[in-house]
Image (cartoon, grey):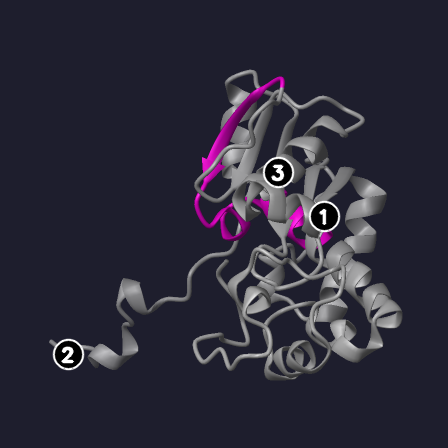
Amino acid sequence: MSFSDPADSPALFDLPPAGPDFVLEQRARLRGLWPVAGCDEAGRGPLAGPVVAAAVILDPDRIPEGLDDSKKLTAKRREDLFEIIMADAVVSVASSSPALIDRINILAASLDAMRRAVCGLARAPMLVLADGRDRPPGIACGAEAVIKGDGRSLSIAAASIVAKVTRDRMMETAGLLYPAYGFDAHAGYGTARHLSAIAEAGPCPLHRRSFRPIREYGRVVEDVTPDAVEP
């Protein structure tokens, strides 16, 4: 009797994680809850610009190939999928301004943008699958919070792509309006270049003044990372 080399049989936990699927949506459909909208936001971490939310109802017969968490896709792939989603799905987008973020806090502003995105859908959903730990309040149907939903649900993945591409385009325009900050390069995140610009010029109207690095502009903020900044 021969035995295979353990290296030939990778452990289950060594296998790459599966991408998003349509299981949550199909389960809801079996319960009579249809259509189902996926909802996600982009831009909670940056120091500047709006937080943007998208709600998407996919056509089960026309689901785009390659949907995934927007952060796992290249900018080119996101742009390509954005066009397909906009053409084949029911989509609504909403945003919360820096002023609203400062007034009610980033979590509340994100959830409010998600609420308005859902309410703006041309077809009313019977269930919303919302990425994260919180459900958007004030919507007329049921909602489920799905932790890491953009990697689990195709509808949420589609919403993550729409929100990300929409916000990136908004920040590219912001880069033209406020060229000193380089918004088109970093989309408002706390990069070294961005922090240096804030130290030199101070905040502009697009900055979130409730976020600590903006409150402390002109000082060295050592614990800010390039990827995300907590308020």
Earlier in the chain: of badge 3 and badge 2, it is: 2
Q: Are marks 3 and 2 in contact (CB under 8 Å)?
A: no
Helix, strand or loop under label 1: loop
On whether residue 147 falls in the magenta region, the answer is yes
Give the vertical position of 19 relative to 155 (above or below): below
- At which x and y percent is residue 227? 54, 72
Closer to the eye: label 1 or 2: 1
Q: Are marks 1 and 2 in contact (CB under 8 Å)?
A: no
Q: Which residue is mark 2?
A: 2
Q: Which residue is mark 1?
A: 97
Give the vertical position of 54 relative to 224 (above or below): above
On whether residue 222 falls in the magenta region, the answer is no
Mark 1 crowd level (few <14, some 14–19, many ≥20, 10 Å Cα): some
Identified at 54% across, 70% down, the residue is 216
Earlier in the chain: of badge 3 and badge 1, it is: 3
Specify the segment rendered in magenta. 140-162
Is residue 40 something one can see in this rendering?
no
Q: Which residue is mark 3?
A: 38
Q: Are marks 3 and 1 in contact (CB under 8 Å)?
A: no
Q: Mark 2: which amino acid? A: Ser
Closer to the eye: label 3 or 2: 3
Identified at 11% across, 76% down, the residue is 1
Mark 3 crowd level (few <14, some 14–19, many ≥20, 10 Å Cα): many
Helix, strand or loop under label 3: strand
Q: Mark 1: which amino acid? A: Ser
- At which x and y percent is residue 217? 59, 73
Identified at 54% across, 30% down, the residue is 26
Q: Measure the C-alpha gap from mark 3 to mark 2.
A: 50 Å
